[in-house]
Amino acid sequence: MLVSDFNFHLPPNSIAQEPPADRAGSRLLHLIRAPQPSMARTPGVWHDRAFRDFPDLLRPDDLLVLNNTRVFPARLYGHRSGERAQALSPHNPASRDFLHGRVEVLLTRQLGDDPNEWECLVRPGRKIGVGEKLFFRETPADSSSATESRAGESPAVLEAEVLARGTFGERRIRFRPVPDFFARIERVGHIPLPPYIDRGDLPADRDRYQTVYAKARGSVAAPTAGLHFTPEILDRIRARGIEIAEITLHVGLGTFQPVRVEKVEDHKLHREYFEISPAAATAINAAKARGRRIVAVGTTTVRTLEFAAQQSTQDDAQSLHGELQPPLGNASSVQPGRGEADIFIYPGYRFRIVDALLTNFHLPQSTLLMLVSAFAGRDFVLASYLHAVDSGYRFYSYGDCMFIE
């Protein structure tokens, strides 16, 4: 299967740059899959709706599963010490600026329980070597100044050292221990808006690039299907007697890393932390046992549930890291616990847990588009995307959504 099979044309003006004025004011494309696509003349139908219709599209006995991860300001701007940089010509007046230049660090995954050690992406990547020291201030220093604190310059709020390099430009860094690490991150960090949002982050993004039910801090990107919910929408869902369960997957490189291979099967995902509580596992397993639908809000929820289902039956049969293709057996239960998931779902995968999906529109040739194509059929999904483009739907994180059942 080729990555290029998941390409589509998207005009730049279709990409949402700002959130809608009203969270629940988004449009919703309702996709209804054919009961037996291999025997049907068409793979399904779709209807143009509004997200406010979503509670009424659910069944009274559905179980709605949310990802309650919380985005933190994981993008840091600072300066490097230049200690490990190759010396430049003293005749070059720009050499000092270059050696002590501005750096951008995107924290992508906390390593273990120690809040000081992280996997991250850095820019400029090729200039940040092992042993380099990085300094982050609440008020960024002028690019022409050295990074070490001097008279008239604010002291660094956080300091870090580069410990190792990764395969695709990642770095492993360790911060100098401080008693209030995440409080300092809140002071110096920026909301990590995706690169297709062509603007800097604003104070309002701290609220709008966050679901109203976010609880567990740890994501560097929002589970965007959840951005449409408001307390009012959740109240309407509960008023219909629909049960809601929450799981956690901290969104990191595994969700948005680019696909750099030609064949889909050759791609491997980064691991992302997840947690399923005993209460959530009990609710999910009870619903499956009674034949009720599991409705996942977002692809992150899908991957968490499907990974956990594989764990339940294949702990010894195969590796749980990166070897998840059509699963064996017909198990449809999950176990409570925590770990790191790197499940890669693409067409051919047989879903064990998820029966319906609310999701935003995704990037061409992305793993998320492949997951949605596995759930609803590639041709059906790409045809619905073409309709969405022609009909003026807003794409990506701050855009509209689709409900697939």
Image: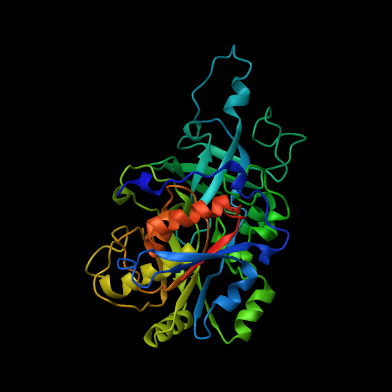
Q: Visible in this render: residue 163?
A: yes
- Residue 236 x, y percent position in the rendering: 65, 80
Which of the 4 image quadrants contains residue 346? bottom left
- Side of 131 relative to 349 (left or right): right
Q: Visible in this render: residue 362?
A: no
- Side of 394 relative to 166 (left or right): right
- Residue 51 x, y percent position in the rendering: 62, 67
Which of the 4 image quadrants contains residue 393? bottom right
Q: Nearer the viewer, residue 176 or 319?
A: 319
- Residue 209 x, y percent position in the rendering: 64, 58
The structure residue drawn at horizontal position 59% and vertical position 45%, both measured from the top left corner, is 159
Can you name the residue that lies furthest to the front here? Answer: 41
Figure disc tally: 0
Q: How is the image coloured?
A: rainbow
- Side of 155 relative to 96 (left or right): right
The structure residue drawn at horizontal position 53% and vertical position 63%, both measured from the top left corner, is 402
Can you name the residue that lies furthest to the right here? Answer: 152
Can you name the residue that lies furthest to the left here? Answer: 317
Q: Nearer the viewer, residue 294 or 201?
A: 294
Residue 387, placed above or below residue 59: above
Which of the 4 image quadrants contains residue 136? top right
Residue 117, placed above or below residue 64: above
